[in-house]
Image (cartoon, rainbow, N blue to C red):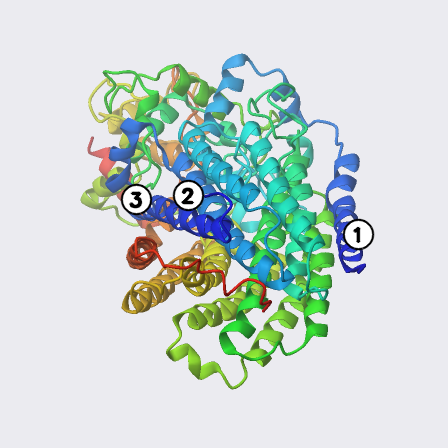
């Protein structure tokens, strides 16, 4: 009987044909020149490399993708992916092994996390207890990467937490900043309704503002303390290095929420999330500003 | 005791049932975590077990412990019956069972310690991969040698599927796990080997992950179904010609489809379009197989009311039809735009491995185990509980995944803030966890029933004495 050899041989030929076109051909033809992101990554210091190993070991890639999908018809990021930055390209991954593209977004995409959230302190607090920075998050705490004696106000990162955050901050394009891909949302000149201080206080908590901004005078978490901001704001716009557009203290607060990079208080990082113009509606913004004015 | 006829199949079945209880328990923890993380991680944190370590433990133990061993048990039961001869070597078969168990144990330990290749479905580290290759060789050698010595000259289609599987899968496993990259020559960042540089790593990863479903679970599972459908209905197979069309089209089309996991992603468009095209073509082998089963079932559907094995098999076949319609559908660019990265996708994976091929495996175990041990399944009532808890639980579970996934996908497309979307799917995560609890109860019931069957009184004569020699 010749059935068996024919079967095995036929099955083998069909399989090898498929493997040739779907594995071998890409293997030999996808050889893009590295992008700036990949070139920088190639020179990454050892803690960033170590951090990537921690990222793999803890299985971060099961819930966080590292690919911003590309719409070749509009030549831009796919609509659901626009909040994550510029589309990623095969040239961004040439130094990556394993590739860690990911398949789920239980959490946000991290391909350009270093551009989106460049603050060490924010990441330490987030890894220590995600609820501090992102209320309602379903991410587990990675408190076992922190030193004994860590608290919610002062998490003490161990060497692995430091390496992991160094890696997350290295996930950046290394290109000059593009105008934000997020379009629409509130602008500085948008008229606001009357604000409600109590609702503003609730929003301050639910948006996680307190994760980085203390309401006690002089306490520095990540960003400046917001105690007395109503008065401080009026002074800031008069500072010699102020280059924003605000003309009153109230407008300064509004500007700081909608466009956090417009002015950075000396001694602080440009770490605040840039998506509040999109996330908040006019009433919510008015409520938060009204609350902050009372501080 | 390693030479006794049928002992390989029996030990594969017992091992499979043990390795079913473990990953479903992990699975419940994961479902609870995604609903209310505070419930779970304070317990896991002291063990340094994060969600990201438990997830591959769940997937690998369920896929390679439970389902693979159950299917191999069924296969080793079927081979002697379709070849009309004894298994080539029960001793070799028993050693395959032993080493397979050790490999799954090693997988659980290494994954818990965070030793991983960092590639979904291909996490097992290089030394375990070597063990798996050895196991595939041992099982395949036993299969090929038995077929070579067969007395029944005609090769029934189930054997085609088994022979095809053991031709394809070792190649797929070797390439998919990038086994030529070992811990000794691994690139920076991949200390356990098994990774390429750049997006080719993702292409090979998804080539593997897709084909482990398509040319391992599907092809063994369909082979088992081809044996069971005529057996449980008492009808002859409707069409042998149709079964061969199904075989050759799956052999041709499946291997091309892996890159549909990277639609819109950072890989060349031609690789995506090729994968989508072949994904749609998958409809041909699936429909020929299902149509063949439907026609074979003709006049016997009413038997699903009383026969639990036939009910598992029939529902498995119907789910096979649905999951293989869903697959081509979600590979399309317009659908993937919404469903990719959402809970829809793991819902699809569970529909394939749990609601399709695990159901076929339950049918096979309920049908084969009594013949392997010479006594009936301990409790018919518990078989009914097993079916209904699993069926109702899965409906909740699958709805939670799928509808929650659609909510995620459409909300992201409206650019809703990420955390708001996380909060908005909480009810679906609760639904999924509820379903998981029901299914867990059903599967524990199954495990207990099999345990009691295994502990029953020994039969006086060898149970297989009458069964062997008589081909199906």
Q: CA distance from mark 1 to mark 2?
A: 36 Å
User: Is B49 positioned to the left or the right of B405 in the image?
Assistant: left
**Chain letter for the residue marked with disc 1 in the picture:** A
Mark 3 crowd level (few <14, some 14–19, many ≥20, 10 Å Cα)? many
Q: Quadrant of residue B290?
A: bottom right
Instruction: Out of B264 and B45, give the one closest to the viewer.
Output: B45
Q: Which residue is mark 3?
A: A286
Disc 2, disc 3: CB below 8 Å? no
Residue A282, position as x, y percentages in the image: 35, 48
**N-term mark: 1 or 3:** 1
Q: Which residue is mark 1?
A: A9
Instruction: Out of A78 and B393, give the one closest to the viewer.
Output: B393
Tell me if I can see residue A281 in this picture: no
Residue beneath the point at 28% across and 45% down:
B36
User: Is B10 positioned to the left or the right of A73 in the image?
Assistant: left
Q: Which mark is residue B58?
A: 2
Residue B384, position as x, y percentages in the image: 32, 69
User: Is B208 positioned to the left or the right of A250 in the image?
Assistant: right
């Amino acid at each position: 009987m010749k059935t068996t050899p024919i079967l095995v041989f036929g099955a083998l030929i069909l399989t090898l044909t498929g493997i040739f076109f779907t594995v071998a051909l890409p293997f030999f033809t996808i050889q893009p020149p590295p992008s700036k992101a990949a070139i920088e990554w190639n020179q990454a210091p050892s803690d960033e490399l170590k951090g990537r190993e921690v990222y793999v070991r803890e299985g971060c890639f099961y819930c966080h993708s590292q690919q911003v999908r590309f719409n070749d018809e509009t030549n831009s990021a796919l609509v659901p992916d626009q909040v994550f930055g510029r589309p990623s390209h095969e040239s961004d991954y040439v130094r990556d092994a394993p590739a860690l593209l990911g398949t789920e977004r239980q959490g946000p995409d991290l391909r350009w996390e270093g551009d989106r959230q460049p603050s060490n302190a924010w990441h330490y607090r987030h890894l220590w207890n995600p609820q501090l920075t992102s209320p309602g998050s379903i991410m587990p705490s990675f408190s076992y990467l922190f030193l004994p004696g860590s608290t919610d106000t002062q998490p003490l990162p161990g060497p692995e937490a430091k390496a992991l955050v160094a890696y997350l901050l290295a996930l950046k394009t290394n290109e000059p900043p593009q105008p934000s891909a997020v379009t629409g949302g509130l602008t500085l000149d948008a008229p606001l309704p009357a604000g409600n201080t109590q609702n503003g206080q609730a929003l301050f908590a639910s948006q996680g503002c307190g994760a980085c901004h203390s309401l006690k005078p002089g306490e520095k978490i990540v960003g400046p303390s917001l105690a007395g901001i109503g008065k401080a704001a009026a002074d800031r716009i008069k500072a010699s290095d102020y280059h924003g557009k605000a003309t009153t203290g109230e407008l300064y607060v509004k500007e700081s929420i909608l466009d956090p990079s417009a002015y950075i208080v000396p001694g602080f990082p440009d770490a605040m999330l840039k998506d509040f113009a999109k996330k908040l509606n006019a009433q919510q913004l008015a409520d938060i500003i009204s609350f902050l004015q009372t501080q | 005791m390693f030479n006794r006829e049928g002992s390989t199949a029996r030990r594969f079945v017992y091992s499979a049932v043990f390795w079913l209880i473990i990953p479903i328990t992990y699975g419940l923890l994961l479902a609870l975590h995604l609903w209310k993380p505070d419930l779970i991680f304070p317990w896991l944190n002291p063990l340094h077990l994060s969600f990201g370590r438990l997830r591959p433990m769940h997937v690998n133990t369920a896929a390679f412990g439970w389902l693979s061993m159950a299917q191999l048990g069924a296969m080793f039961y079927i081979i002697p019956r379709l070849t009309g001869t004894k298994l080539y070597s029960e001793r070799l078969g028993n050693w395959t069972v032993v080493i397979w168990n050790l490999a799954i144990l090693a997988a659980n330990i290494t994954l818990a310690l965070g030793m991983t290749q960092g590639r979904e479905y291909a996490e097992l580290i290089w030394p375990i991969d070597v063990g798996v290759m050895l196991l595939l060789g041992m099982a395949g050698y036993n299969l090929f040698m038995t077929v070579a010595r067969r007395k029944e000259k005609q090769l029934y289609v189930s054997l085609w599927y088994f022979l095809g599987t053991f031709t394809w899968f070792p190649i797929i496993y070797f390439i998919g796990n990038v086994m030529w990259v070992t811990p000794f020559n691994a690139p920076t960042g991949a200390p356990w080997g098994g990774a390429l540089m750049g997006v080719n790593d993702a292409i090979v990863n998804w080539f593997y992950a897709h084909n482990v479903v398509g040319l391992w679970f599907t092809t063994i599972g369909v082979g088992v179904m081809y044996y069971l459908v005529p057996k449980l209905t008492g009808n002859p197979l409707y069409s042998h010609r149709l079964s061969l069309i199904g075989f050759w089209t799956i052999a041709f089309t499946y291997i091309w489809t892996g890159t549909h996991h990277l639609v819109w992603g950072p890989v060349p468009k031609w690789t995506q379009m090729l994968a989508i095209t072949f994904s749609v073509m998958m409809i041909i082998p699936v429909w020929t197989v299902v149509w063949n089963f439907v026609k074979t079932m003709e006049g016997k559907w009413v038997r699903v009311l009383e026969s639990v094995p036939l009910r598992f098999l029939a529902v498995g076949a119907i789910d096979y039809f649905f999951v293989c319609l869903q697959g081509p559908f979600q590979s399309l660019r317009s659908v993937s735009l919404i469903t990719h990265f959402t809970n829809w996708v793991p819902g699809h994976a569970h529909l394939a491995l749990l609601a399709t091929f695990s159901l076929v495996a339950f049918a096979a175990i309920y049908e084969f185990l009594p013949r392997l041990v010479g006594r009936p399944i301990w409790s018919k009532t518990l078989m009914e509980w097993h079916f209904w808890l699993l069926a109702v639980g899965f409906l909740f579970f699958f709805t939670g995944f799928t509808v929650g996934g659609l909510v995620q996908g459409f909300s992201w497309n409206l650019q809703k803030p990420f955390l708001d979307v996380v909060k908005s799917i909480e009810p679906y995560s609760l639904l999924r966890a509820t379903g998981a609890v029901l299914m867990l109860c059903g599967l524990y019931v199954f495990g207990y029933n099999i345990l009691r069957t295994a502990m029953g009184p020994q039969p006086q004569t060898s149970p297989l004495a009458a069964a062997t020699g008589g081909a199906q």
